[in-house]
Image (spheres, rainbow, N blue to C red):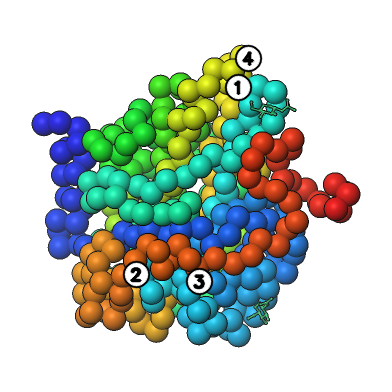
Amino acid sequence: MQWASLAAVALLAQNAAGQAMLRFACSQLVVDRVDPIVNPGQIYTPHLHQIVGGNSFNISMLEDPAAHDLPAKSTCTSCSFREDLSNYWTAVMFFKARNGTYKRVPQTGNGGPQGRLLNKGGLDIYYMKSGRVTSFKPGFRMIAGNAANKVDSSVSKSNICHRCWTSTSDSPFVGGAPCSGSDTVGIPYDKKCKMIRQTIIFPHCWDGKNLDSPDHQSHVAYGQGGGATGGGACPSTHPVKLPQIMYELMWDISKFVADSSIWPTDGSNPFVYSMNLGGSAAHGDYVFGWKGDTLQKAMDNNCNLDNSCPSAGITKQSNSVYDACTVGQQAPEPVDGWLSSLPLGSLAVRGE
Ligand SMILES: *[C@@H]1O[C@H](CO)[C@@H](O)[C@H](O)[C@H]1NC(C)=O
Ligand SMILES: *[C@@H]1O[C@H](CO)[C@@H](O)[C@H](O)[C@H]1NC(C)=O
């Protein structure tokens, strides 16, 4: 059996137990130095993020989460389903050229066994389940990963990982289930890689009480096992099984690996996230914002992939519609082109 079909079987097997999953594209709403979970109200946060989802996203939206009704305040979403006004964000990746300048790594939609998703930047979102799950509540938010972590071994590679893609096409599909096999915590930089797929799998067990916690993590926990299984059994401290959220990002590094005049000569890894750290610091942020009980119904009714699903009242939008949903960047600094330094630290200190 070929890898492609093995992978398809592995991925479909998790759904074969009657478990459908949502899998859909989100284009970039904005690339900006803002983070309403970790730094509410602060402009500008220490590192750059790409944000996708509802356009009511703003730096103070979580100062009083009860007052910020995401589905009511957003007039559009950069994600596929019209009823999903949630916000999702991650760091962005840069290539550091031999001469010390940086360029943001372009992103592309993901293919894989279930077909190609169309994104303008951004990421692909999965909501998976194993057995019955309870939807997030309005105001719920969480973080997966640690933006300051420098130690690969302190990351569970079955939850946060990278994969070397040796073709700029995702067909045939490379490798097996997400965060398995030869996937790594660090960012691969072998010149045979043409794309890097980043996967962030969130905890799926909730304490049932807190919409957030001081570290934005301890109100949730990973369950038994790891990986994109829909979620194993939950511990007694966090007994409520949530949908398992997974982010998938495709970083297209083909132009960088093809140009030996810019590739570092000292053997260093030229790829860093916007914290100026490697894969050990990969992280994702999530704020729930589905309309009414649409997510619960989508899970209960086995709505699948990015298809419209009338039984849950969720509607697939065309990519031109969700691509057009954007918000303005606030930090007055370039994030594209060759940059003499990463957009980090205080803008005031940098004379702006
Ligand atoms: C940001 O969201 C908060 C909370 O909903 C709201 O009070 C504020 O007006 C918003 N700010 C902007 C600039 O839209
Ligand atoms: C560094 O290299 C990039 C890519 O070749 C080039 O565009 C840029 O002008 C160079 N910058 C400096 C300061 O040499």
Q: Which disc, if any, is residue 317?
A: 2
For label 1, the residue is 262
Q: Can residue 125 be seen in this view?
A: no
For label 3, the residue is 54
Question: Which kind of residue does numbered mark 2 sit on?
Answer: Gln
Q: Which residue is drawn at 30% across and 46% down?
A: 111
Q: Is the residue under label 4 in contact with that under label 1 (CB below 8 Å)?
A: no
Relative side of 120 to 261, left or right: left
Q: Nearer the viewer, mark 1 or mark 3?
A: 1
**The CB of the residue at mark 1 lies under 8 Å from ligand 2:** yes
Relative side of 335 to 309, left or right: right
Question: Which kind of residue does numbered mark 4 sit on?
Answer: Asp
Q: Nearer the viewer, mark 1 or mark 4?
A: 1
Q: Residue at x 50, y 84 (%)?
A: 72
For label 4, the residue is 266
Give the distance between the C-alpha atoms of the residues marked 3 and 4, in whole angstroms.
Answer: 43 Å
